[in-house]
Every structure is written in C-alpha cells, then in structure tokens.
Amino acid sequence: MSTTRRKFIGVSAAAFGAAAWAPELLSAPEEPPTKADTSLRILVLGGTGFLGPACTESALARGHKVTHFTSGRTEERRHAAGRPSAVPEGVEQFYGNRDPNKTAADRKNEGNADAPKDADSPKGLSQLVGRKWDGVIDTSGFFPRMVKASAELLGPNVKQYLFISTISVYKDSSTPNFDETAALSRMADPTSEDMGKDFANYGGGKALCEKAAEEAMPGRVTILRPGFMVGPRDTSGRFLYWPVRASLGGVMVVPGAPTDPIQFIDVRDVADWIVHCLEQTILGVYNVTGPGKSLSMGKMVESVRSGTASAVEFMWIANDFLESHGVQDGQFPLYAPPTGPTAGLHRCNFSRALARGLTFRALTETAKACLDWYHSLPVATQAAVAPQFAQRPGQDPWLETEKHLLESWNQRGKS
C-alpha cells in the first residue's frame, strides 16, 4: 500500500473546503484556562472553519479580544441551511475578499455562488486600513500575493504576524527527523494561483507565502508548519475514522505493524500554542505536530479504544497484503508506511516548538471529543464526514470490506 505525499496534501487541503459542516460552538472545557496577564487584540484572517474557531475559543478563554476577517461564505452556507452562526458572541466581524483588487460584487459577477450576500462590501482588505491589533493569525493564506497584501497593509499597525503554513512545504518526506532547515518545495510557476492537479502547488504556494510574510514584516513573523491537525470540526475524516470505527466494536483491521510511527496533533493544542506565541512574542519558524513523546500505531489504537470505551479488537494486516487485495491509498486515514517516500512523514522533528512551550492533551480525550462531535451531527453530515460507515445503495459498507479482508488474511497459506 503506497500512501503518497500528494495524498496527504489533498486530504489536508480538503478540510478547508468542508468547513460548512462544522457545528456552531463546542462546549466549554471542564476547567477553563487562566486569564492572560494582558488582554491582546487579535485579528484572525479566516476564522469559521477548523483551526480558526479553535483559535478564537482559545483566545477568548484567555481574555483576549478577537476580530474575524472572512469571505463570509461559510456563514452564508450556515444561514442558508437555517443554522445559527458559529461565531461566538463578542467577536467583531469584517467581511471581504483577501484579493485586494476584488469586491464581493466582483465575485458574484464572476459567477461565484458562494460570494457573500453583502455585494457592496469595499474592495479587498480596505476595511482593515488604520486598525490596530497586537497580533494577526493568518489561517487562510495559500498564495503569496494575498499574504503580501495582508502583511503589508497590516504591518504598520500590528506587532506580530503569525502565519499558518504546513509541513507539506518540505520537498522530501522520505528522511526521518527532518526539521525546519530541510529543503522546501518550489512551484514551477511562482505566479500561479491554482492548486494544480492533486494539490501539487499546495506546499510550494505555502512556502512562498512564508517568504512574503517575512519580507513584508521582517523580524515580526511567526511561521507555524503543522502536520496532521485533528479534533472536533475536522471534516476530512483523517482521524475521525479511528474513533468511529472503534466504537462499532468487533474485529478492526489495522494496517502495517503496531510499531509503525504516527504523528498528529489536536487542533485545540495548536490553537492554545498559537495564542501562547502571541502572548510571549515567540517568533521564527516551527514544525508543529505531536504528541510530545513518540507515538506508535499500536499505542494510538489502544488510546482510541480507551477513549471511546470500546471493546473492539485489532487485527494487524501487512501493507503488501492489503495492497494486493485492493485497499487503496487513504482507506486507512492518517497512516503512512514508514518506508520509501513516506518514511519520514510521521517522524518530523518538532523539538523547537516543544522547547517553546507546546503542550498536548491526552489522546484518549481527543478520541472521545471527536466521537462526541460526530454523534452530535445530523445523520446526513455523519455520512459526509465518515463516508466509510454510510449505508449507500449499491455499495458495500466498509465493515463488509473489512470482513472479507479478515477472512482472506486468516486463510492465507491454507489453500
């Protein structure tokens, strides 16, 4: 079974497009965090999808003031579906286009049905002119022209610009222990604003965005390169698959070997550290993934079983056997064989972030929170975020596929 780096990029980017499925608000943590000594004014560029809401909730819990600048598309889709806003009370909101040359009306004239209803909103970022913030969290920059426009406009009135990049900026994921000095991807055409086939321009575009931000605000930029972010509101299914499947019990197929490495981080831990970086003015470039100690697939599925209070049993099946029996890339989300092109994908060095205070909640808590979130969704939305377990006419559910795999695995060598 060959899990490619491009597959990782595609799954990561898909999470952004699915944000309209996210629930409105999550319940408050059992033990609210302590308030920060100083209340910051924080601007979030994008804030209603996955990481953005987690940042907003973390910042508000610490006593900071939050402003959102968004296109309004996610909120419009919620409104059309008769659902309330996902933006917490007290958050200031601006709507507009990150393209400094376009208005919402331009987007409608181009046939963009997702454009905000406010077709008379001013061009691009003009609503932000002259406003002051202590920190900016840019969760929605994918191409350098947009990031350059944002950072240059905000630079004179902002102390710190925190840009959310990705570990997909790295050219090669085949070498374990790669750190922030590893070679970066490049776009064949640096001026392109198209993700390209299989999101081929995703990593290179993010690398150019990093450069654009630093050039616009030299010495005042924080670059975070997250790996797989998981948790409530993650509609990509990359982690959700595991607690949902575990909750169904029976015998569960797990690819590879229990010792295979795996890395990911709860989005709420990323958000908490983002706020910490703004509070402590932490600058520079950081890989951001987890957990704090090395994690194996065996330990991961055991933690998921515990967090979901499941009695599921595990059957480990070799990757080459799965591939020979038609298992395709991505059918076991998150997992990548620790060999060949993906030998280093789950062995990223993030010691710099650890040294600056990155912390992690228990994996059992993440598993439970994800399953609780899944159960809170309408049935149709559950089918969209965890399609492996949806009953679809004319198609076998994943559990049937698993059953056949188990039978074949148990019969190997007996014929």
Image: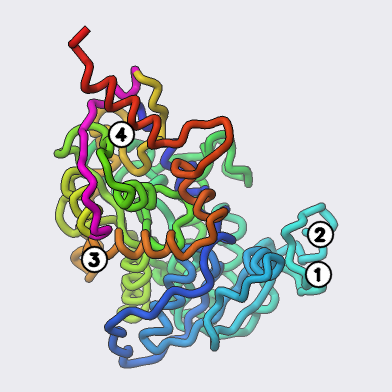
Residue tagged 3 = 360
Question: Can residue 244 be seen?
Answer: yes
Residue tagged 4 = 342
Distance between the alpha carbons at the discs numbered 4 and 2:
42 Å
Distance between the alpha carbons at the discs numbered 3 and 1:
42 Å
Q: Amino acid at mark 2?
A: Lys
Q: Amino acid at mark 3?
A: Phe
Question: Which of the two discs, 3 and 1, sits closer to the camera?
Answer: 3
Residue tagged 2 = 108
Does label 4 or label 2 sit earlier along the sequence? Answer: 2
> Label 2 near label 1: C-beta < 8 Å?
yes
Q: Residue at x 61, y 56 (%)?
A: 145
Q: Secondary structure at mark 3?
A: loop
Distance between the alpha carbons at the discs numbered 2 and 3:
43 Å
Q: Is residue 96 left or right of residue 306?
A: right
Q: Secondary structure at mark 2?
A: helix
Q: Secondary structure at mark 1?
A: loop
**In this picture, which residue range is highlighted in magenta?**
307-324
Who is closer to the viewer here, 61 or 197? 61
Who is closer to the viewer here, 165 or 377? 377
- Other residues around mark 1 within 10 Å, as few (<14) / some (14–19) / many (≥20): some
Question: Can residue 97 be seen?
Answer: no
